[in-house]
Image: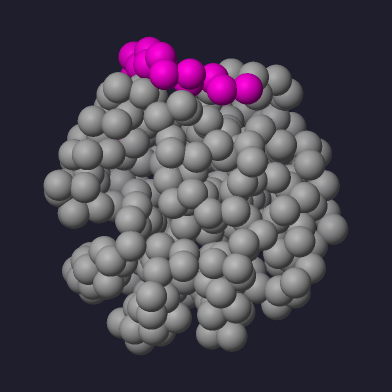
Amino acid sequence: MKKNPLMGRQLSALKDVEGDSVPPGLPAVVDAHVHVFPGPIFKAVWAWFEEYGWPIRYQLRSEDLIQYLLSRGMSHVVALQYAHKPGIARDLNRYMARLQERFSGKVTGMATVFPGEPDGDAILKEAFEMGLSGVKLHTHVQCFDMNSRELNEVCATCAREGKPMVVHAGREPKSPAYKCDPYLLCSAEKLENILKNFPDLKMCVPHLGMDEIVAYSHLIEKYDTLWLDTTMAIADFLPLDVAVRLEEMRTDRVMYGTDFPNIPYAWDRELKKLMRYPLSERALNGILGENAKSFFGIS
């Protein structure tokens, strides 16, 4: 990917046609990367994207966006959120637990915490007791170094509790609107340090690790505890410098995800793109659902 593809300028939305349902012939599909937030936070996120990223096509409330995906044939949704400042994680985790309960059996909710905030360990233990299945963090928004003491503390809690982590650890998309430089905080090398230090911790890096897609494809060959998701990396939207060749990757460590609703194109765009890859039936089944079930413990 070209460095700094956003650079403060808004990318144009795509006007591709959306389908009414999951394309026929596909196995059960798990969307492993869907964002939910309370209304005021969602509005702030969308405003940020409108100014610095791209227009958000689906500005839906959390309950509505989950129902939107389920009604179109998604078999399961993994719901993610992140605390952009200290002191709000407990409320966000309670919010997530209520959503998970409302869509029982159809939604897997992930907890969040602000790395380094007081009582972080207790915040996560409470979230797990409420039934949340792991932790979601975002390096660009939360501005922590991948090899910092703050992140190590979260990793230690998840490893001890047997809970997976989803961490936006790729350096892209970078924007001057962030309060920190992800190129200083993130790298495949830093992520590998975590895998070495916490050998029992399952981690997923979204977006195939953009902009280090090749490096991350090598890491999933090397480590059984690392997964990647496809979110926005196969949509032909962001300007990549390399061709994404899923068929050449370790496909049992790749999960399908969308970033819904924070996308500027049709909800099923990446499903349609995925169908064009020369993948075996086993690989496609894994990417579309079985790998996510294994990572998140979805029954």
Magenta stretch: dominant secondary structure = loop
Q: As displayed, is residue 159 above or below residue 57? A: below
Q: As displayed, is residue 19 above or below residue 189? A: above
Q: Which residues are magenta?
A: 3-21
Q: Is residue 10 magenta?
A: yes
Q: Quadrant of residue 233?
A: top right
Q: As displayed, is residue 203 above or below residue 264? A: below
Whether residue 82 is visible to the viewer of this picture, yes or no, is: yes
Q: Is residue 142 left or right of residue 292?
A: left
Residue 123, percent from left and from top:
36, 78
Residue 112, percent from left and from top:
39, 65
Whether residue 162 is visible to the viewer of this picture, yes or no, is: no
- Residue at the image point whose x is 34% and y is 52% from the top: 84
Which one is in front, 200 or 118?
A: 118
- Residue at the image point whose x is 54% and y is 80% from the top: 157
Residue 5, percent from left and from top:
54, 20
- Residue at the image point whose x is 18% and y is 54% from the top: 38
- The quadrant the N terminus occupies is top right
Q: Is residue 223 left or right of residue 158?
A: right
Q: Is residue 297 magenta?
A: no
